[in-house]
Image (tube, rainbow, N blue to C red):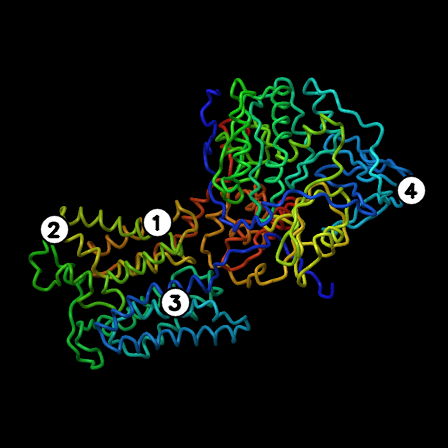
Amino acid sequence: MSKRLDGVLTAVKRGRGGVAVAHNKNTADMPVERLPIPGKVVISMQQHIGVPCTPVVKVGDEVAVGQVIGDSDKFISAPIHATVSGRVTAVGDIKLANGIITKGITIESDGEMRLYEGIKPPVVTNKKELCEAVRASGVVGLGGAGFPTHVKFNLPDDSKVDTLIINAAECEPYITVDYRECIDNTKYIIKGVELLRDICGFKQIIIAIEDNKPQAFKDLKAFADSDNDADDTIKLMTLKSRYPQGAEKMMVLSATGRKVPPGKLPSDVGCVVINVASLAFIARYVETGKPLVSRSITVDGSAIKEPKNLRVPIGTNIQDIIDYCGGFKSEPRKILSGGPMMGIAICDTNAPICKQNNAILAFADRKDLIKTERECIRCGRCVDVCPMSLMPTLIERYARVKDAEKLNDIGVMVCMECGSCAYACPSGRPLVQYMRLAKQVVREGGKK
Amino acid sequence: MSKKLTVSPSPHVRSKETTTGIMLDVIIALIPALIMSAYYFGLRALLLTAVCVGSAVLSEYVCRRVMKRNNTLGDLSAVVTGLILALNLPSSLPLWMGALGSIIAIVVVKQMFGGIGQNFVNPAMTARIILMVSFPTAMAHWVAPFAGSWSPDAVTAATPMAVLAGVQGGDVSAVADSLPSLTGMLFGVHGGSMGEVCSLALIAGGLYLIIRKVISPIIPLCFIGTVAVFMLIAGGGSLEFTAYQLLGGGLMLGAFFMATDYSTSPLNKKGKIIFGIGCGLITSIIRIFGSLPEGVSFSIILMNILVPHIENLTTPKPFGYVKEKKGGKAE
């Protein structure tokens, strides 16, 4: 019997602020279904934070699943692979869901999903090989940010990083793909944890999950308690569900009590934070060598006929996904790529899924989504809920007069645009928009 | 898709709380005090309240029209201002003075500084002070409870604050005859402005606002707490004297409903603490050393003016901020 007791931690230190957003995890009991092979996919060359990739195939090329079709020699970037087998029919400008025009590759599927012959499991025995393998897999932060994962593992030998935090908080409402990952793919999460422990030598590995995910908690706890972890480095931590618990800096604070200073990364305080789905993917990649060609997304919202969790090839058209979910049951008024707190409202469903999309949500009623905008009454709710200890209402004022110096002083650059302030605002002010404007003002140096 | 999709910045869900809802909560919280004032001072109290609220609403409407701004009556803040002003007046006040007070509060103090959220002093409180200085007799004509306030020569009563001003060293027994009992103080059976007499109703309203999370308890606690400590010392440890000081005058009304005014109080916790203690100190100093029997209004106005400075001093450091080390660069 394992001598470790429950092995369940609670937050070392709870972050301030945050808001209690209705969870609406309607799809929590729906295992991830596989979407039928789409007729064609449009794969963007910009699916991550960092340098866009350059296409390495041309029109007419035959490609197979997992073949590299876009790459970059820059470090902060991640290669892009063909997600179906077939023929390249176009290489050129495409429009993404958020309206941005970028380079993209269109592949007409032959319906065979033939795997690329070059695929073989990577050899991973040390940190350098791990970092290279992770880069080659094309994985980026699947939780929504899209930061190339390998950058996090590019640790110098003398690095002071001692803690790995597996982020399974999934604090955005509606989205349940990370939750499903914990239940359906527990095996790979475990493999991933063990792999990273053995290769990187983390002193502690903390799997952090919100307390509104009982089944996932149960499955992971069985693992944290198991005998595979003889020296007790792996711990499960439950967090009180509160948005934005899953934000990286909040995670680091909850798990270790350390605060990531403004402009720094978790590794500066000795932590690596990785999304649970990204972790499971890495474990699978090391086993099979099959790069990131599909991902799970939640399709939900009041306008969707049959909400589902789906595994879709990257580059699948959003409209195809909605059609597979029975289409709209009522006129959609707002469609989101991502969660309702930080997701992007899209103007056209004729756009491809990218690596960092974790949900497509369609809402019928604008009433739920829009609040009458009134003057600020200085009630201070935005100040109370800001997890970064900022004063959004003051930032709004300074942003309007473009006072870059003052904005910088009150720390607007720390803002992660979690949306808690705008959520809580009784006057319905678009505070996140003002935060973005304010950052722009600071970058440009203010009044000219 | 026939209709176009809405595109807007995140977040795409919003809390159910609205400005109107908050103002409505304040109105609800003031209703017990209003009912008690009607009970003690008769229908005249309700009439004066109606006049104050009506003229506040009307002047807000006219003012916004004249200034070619959007109509803001829907946020109910004008109703709140009118209501709070009324509760700060003696029930026998000529109606036109009440109306004038509302006009000053809305037009001069609120709208001329940009409307809701922009005024730097509490509108109702400022209007009250202006009325007090302009019409000292009418504003100090405290009708005794149940005396009826229709007739200008209704029986008047000195307020407990005026009586207490003559007390030396916290010994209330000397003036016991002219003071109501402490229970009387709690229920409001004494002279005073319409809304301030019944402390119980005000505390109930204040608790309602705290429970509904409309106000934070910090300011009222610091305000009342500071007055309590100061009075205990000034009264030589007399609990009775302290209790009279806490229940008398406009302290409860001021601490729960006026010092907590969003526009004119600090945004963050530290600032709220300083603000509350400051209000309490000034109130106590005026009551003990000043020639005025009451100091709540002035203390709040004075602290209102200090709010921008308090905020500058108490702006919280952003998450993870590291102090610059001496002689070196920030880490």
Do the CB atoms of the residues marked 3 and 4 lie less than 8 Å apart? no
Q: Which mark is residue B80?
A: 3
Task: Please name the residue that numbered disc 1 is placed on.
Answer: B218
Q: Earlier in the sequence, mark 3 or mark 1?
A: 3
Distance of label 3 from label 4 (alpha carbons): 69 Å
Of badges 1 and 4, nearer the viewer stands 4
Q: Position of residue A349 (x, y in %)?
A: 74, 54
Q: Which mark is residue B169?
A: 2
Chain bearing mark 1: B
Residue B232 in the figure: left or right of residue B95: left
Distance of label 1 from label 2 (alpha carbons): 30 Å
* Type of the residue with mark 1: Ile
Of badges 2 and 3, nearer the viewer stands 3
Do the CB atoms of the residues marked 2 and 3 lie less than 8 Å apart? no
* Type of the residue with mark 2: Gly
* Type of the residue with mark 4: Val
Distance of label 2 from label 3 (alpha carbons): 39 Å
Going 61% across and 62% down the picture, which residue do you hit? A365
Q: Earlier in the sequence, mark 1 or mark 2?
A: 2
* Type of the residue with mark 3: Val
Of badges 3 and 4, nearer the viewer stands 4
Of badges 4 and 2, nearer the viewer stands 4
- Helix or strand or loop: what does disc 2 sit on? loop
Do the CB atoms of the residues marked 1 and 4 lie less than 8 Å apart? no
- Helix or strand or loop: what does disc 4 sit on? loop
Do the CB atoms of the residues marked 4 and 2 lie less than 8 Å apart? no
Residue B56 in the figure: left or right of residue A332: left
A231 and A261: which is toward the camera: A231
Whether labels 2 and 3 belong to a single chain: the reply is yes
Do the CB atoms of the residues marked 3 and 1 lie less than 8 Å apart? no
